[in-house]
Image (tube, helix red, strand yellow):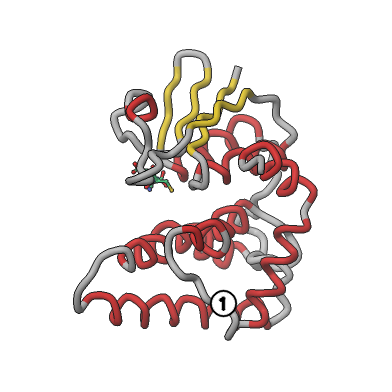
């Protein structure tokens, strides 16, 4: 049985959403953040050497790291859903946005939690990423890979939405991103996932 260990308001909400999109059976275990430090509790740290969310278990397997979990579930259970292949004209868009979300946008946003001269540099980088994303969405892309909703959209949603609980993510200057967020949040699988992952 697949178990998702969801740390409240964290990237593990993507795994819940992915399972809802794929209509997979899973058990959900909710873990609360430390109310002062907002870090993962000790019980979460014990799940996997990384100590970070998300973590899944599947039989004897214990797996962390968002991209690894996403690939594991898509390969085993995806049946070709939520991806586009090399023959699709949007394939490289799919690859770019999928990896850019956690490879570049998330780390830059995390740096805003630090202090010092790095902040304006990182803010400028985030602005460039968001401008490019807005432009991409403005040019006939309902989703990041054209008309096909893919896991790239699930990856991108977190920095644009839940990350706002930690850093100020102001997308008001980007109307296409604003409309995109509304489309993401209107998906029935997203709403089912959030009702389970973030009750109240
Ligand atoms: N690259 C990792 C990042 C994991 C990560 O930093 N997770 C955060 C939640 S969004 C976390 O566990 N924070 C709590 C803590 O570090 O105590 C992944 O995508 O899984």
Q: Quadrant of ligand 1?
A: top left
| Location of the N terminus (image quadrant) | top right
Q: Residues within 10 Å of mark 1 (few under 14, many from 20)?
A: some
* Beta carbon at label 1 within 8 Å of ligand 1: no
Horizontal side of 43 relative to 136 (left or right) equals left
Residue placed most toward the observer, 75 or 112: 112
Question: Where is residue 51 drawn, in percent x and y?
Answer: 33, 34
Q: Residue furthest left?
A: 116
Question: Where is residue 167 drawn, in percent x and y?
Answer: 43, 65
Vertical placement of residue 24 versus 162, above or below: above
Residue sitting at x 33%, y 68% = 112
Residue sitting at x 73%, y 78% = 140
| Location of the C terminus (image quadrant) | top right
Vertical placement of residue 66 versus 180, above or below: above
Q: Residue furthest front?
A: 36
Vertical placement of residue 18 versus 44, above or below: below
Horizontal side of 132 relative to 109 (left or right) equals right
Horizontal side of 101 relative to 135 (left or right) equals left
Picture quadrant where residue 139 is located: bottom right
Q: Residue furthest bottom?
A: 173
Question: Which residue position is annotated with label 1?
Answer: 171
Q: Secondary structure at mark 1?
A: loop
Question: Where is residue 133 drawn, in percent x and y?
Answer: 56, 76
Horizontal side of 127 relative to 170 (left or right) equals left
Question: Where is residue 186 drawn, in percent x and y?
Answer: 78, 58
Residue sitting at x 58%, y 85% = 173
Residue sitting at x 36%, y 82% = 124
Picture quadrant where residue 20 is located: top right
Residue placed most toward the observer, 74 or 49: 49
């Amino acid at each position: 049985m697949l178990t998702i260990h969801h740390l409240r308001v964290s990237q593990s909400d993507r795994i819940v959403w992915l399972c809802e999109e794929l209509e997979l059976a899973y058990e959900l275990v909710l873990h609360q953040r430390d109310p002062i430090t907002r870090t993962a509790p000790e019980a979460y740290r014990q799940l996997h050497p990384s100590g970070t969310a998300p973590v899944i278990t599947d039989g004897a397997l214990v797996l962390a790291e968002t991209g690894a979990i996403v690939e594991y579930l898509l390969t085993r259970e995806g049946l070709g859903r939520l991806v586009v292949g090399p023959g699709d004209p949007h394939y490289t868009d799919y690859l770019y946005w999928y990896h850019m979300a956690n490879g570049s946008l998330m780390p830059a946003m995390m740096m805003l939690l630090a202090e010092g001269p790095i902040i304006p540099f990182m803010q400028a980088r985030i602005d460039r990423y968001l401008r490019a994303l807005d432009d991409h969405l403005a040019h006939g892309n309902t989703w990041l890979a054209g008309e096909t909703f893919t896991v790239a959209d699930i990856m991108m949603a977190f920095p644009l939405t839940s990350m706002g609980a930690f850093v100020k993510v102001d997308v008001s200057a980007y109307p296409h991103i604003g409309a995109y967020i509304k489309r993401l949040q209107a998906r029935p699988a997203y709403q089912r996932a959030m009702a389970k992952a973030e009750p109240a």
